[in-house]
Amino acid sequence: MPRLASFLSFSSVARIMSDATDKNGDVTESNTRSSELLRHVSVVLSVIASSLGDVRFLHTSDWHVGRTFHGADLLAEQAAVLDHLADLVAAEAVDVVLVSGDVYDRAVPSAEAVQVANRALARLREAGAQLVLTSGNHDSAPRLGAFGDFAAAGGLHLRTTIARIADPVLLRDEHGPVAVYGIPYLEPEPARHALGVPEAKGHNGVLTEAMRRIREDLRGRERGTRSVVLAHAFVTGGQGTDSERTIAVGGVEQVSGDVFAGVDYVALGHLHGPQTLAEHLRYSGSPLAYSFSEAQQRKSVWLVDFDANGLAEVRRHELPVPRRLATLRGGIEWLLTAEEHADLADCYLSVTLTDSVRPIDAMRRLRERFPYAVHLEWQPENGKATATLRYAEAVRGRSDAEITRNFLDDCRGAPPSEREERLLRKALEVAGRGES
């Protein structure tokens, strides 16, 4: 299709929302009919047919807008990558952008994070694509889904509630309908009761019920209806990183890929590395690296084409890297002077120092050469820093002075200097704890 035209801009929706709310931001009783009208408009717009081609999706997830990287603000990098997605939508004539959860990093994102996400969504819409978003385990589903009916009128379809799991966004191309279902992240305990399956166990149980409802809805639709499902879960066979928050329940967080049988494409979110579990079952991964365990990953999105039979082709598009990640290991003097490290000055850097004595003020010194050094460890080559200390053994039969000397030795790999010994003795004398 000539890429599902832009029917209403976000600015138009914003004006309608403003007209339908009072000064406190609540929907006024007199404008309830406006909300109903928008609900019907969104349904009509979702099924309008264009006729010159097949449907093309862009699958992305885990934006985590507002996340920091070892304390460093990432909003500028996130905005840059999301801007690239909008350019890609325009260049590739994408019809629908799928965002499979974790739009934000926190349930209550900062105003700045909301601003970055809103701008990204608006740019994607202006580039010509409709959007389908689900909530992830980092998102607040009620907050993300607020004003969902109004947003749908402008091409932003939010699926954040259990009640709408089997309520697809309906698209149509020259071959017929495409149903896009969004499964928000399902916390097993409350979800099993809300889904009416109290016997369901863990993530596998509640997702099995969600997919049963979706397949039941599909069976009642027009013959040949093709289907897409968005889900936020840890599917067996996927490879995690250090940056995902665990969703384990009773020690079990994984679900079987067989749960998603019966649909043409499953757009997964939660794991931050791009990966293919089956031709129709994929993680897009996060658009940025959020831990040094992801330093070697090539962040990407999937471009997914449908034809008359369903899934036709999936292409990977690698994303730009606003700031690279790198690791360094060695003595501090060598790291600060070696020419071969000059190209790492603009990288987020994790440094492991191997000096036998812990360098004083190491991070400040490193940042004079590497301003984006964000993580520091000390692992002396003599192995002292890795020794396991047991408090009872460390203090048994020793004076306060000996305990203090050993503490300094254990922490930095060297005993007190003569000057430090004098200061130590003086301090203990003042405290009445001097050696007899």
Image (cartoon, rainbow, N blue to C red):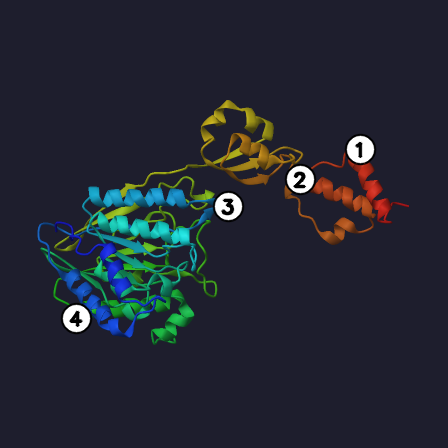
**85 w.r.t. 308: above or below:** above
The Cα–Cα distance between marks 3 and 1, rounded to whole angstroms, is 37 Å
Q: Where's residue 415, x and y in %?
A: 75, 37
**177 w.r.t. 97: above or below:** below
Residue type of the residue flagged with mark 3: Gly
For residue 114, side relative to residue 263 (left or right): right
Q: Earlier in the sequence, mark 3 or mark 1?
A: 3
Local crowd size for mark 1, using a 10 Å CA cut-off: few (<14), some (14–19), many (≥20): few
Residue type of the residue flagged with mark 2: Lys
Q: Secondary structure at mark 1?
A: helix
* Most foreground residue, 139 or 295: 139
Q: Which residue is mark 3?
A: 71
The Cα–Cα distance between marks 1 and 4, rounded to whole angstroms, is 85 Å
Q: Which residue is mark 4?
A: 220
Q: Which residue is mark 2?
A: 384
Residue sitting at x 43%, y 59%: 108
Q: Which mark is residue 418?
A: 1
Q: Where's residue 143, x and y in %?
A: 37, 63
The Cα–Cα distance between marks 2 and 3, rounded to whole angstroms, is 28 Å
Residue 134 sits in which quadrant?
Answer: bottom left
Q: Where's residue 305, x and y in %?
A: 19, 49
Q: Which of labels 2 and 4 is toward the front? A: 4
Q: Where's residue 348, x and y in %?
A: 47, 38
For residue 85, side relative to residue 66 (left or right): left
Q: Earlier in the sequence, mark 1 or mark 4?
A: 4
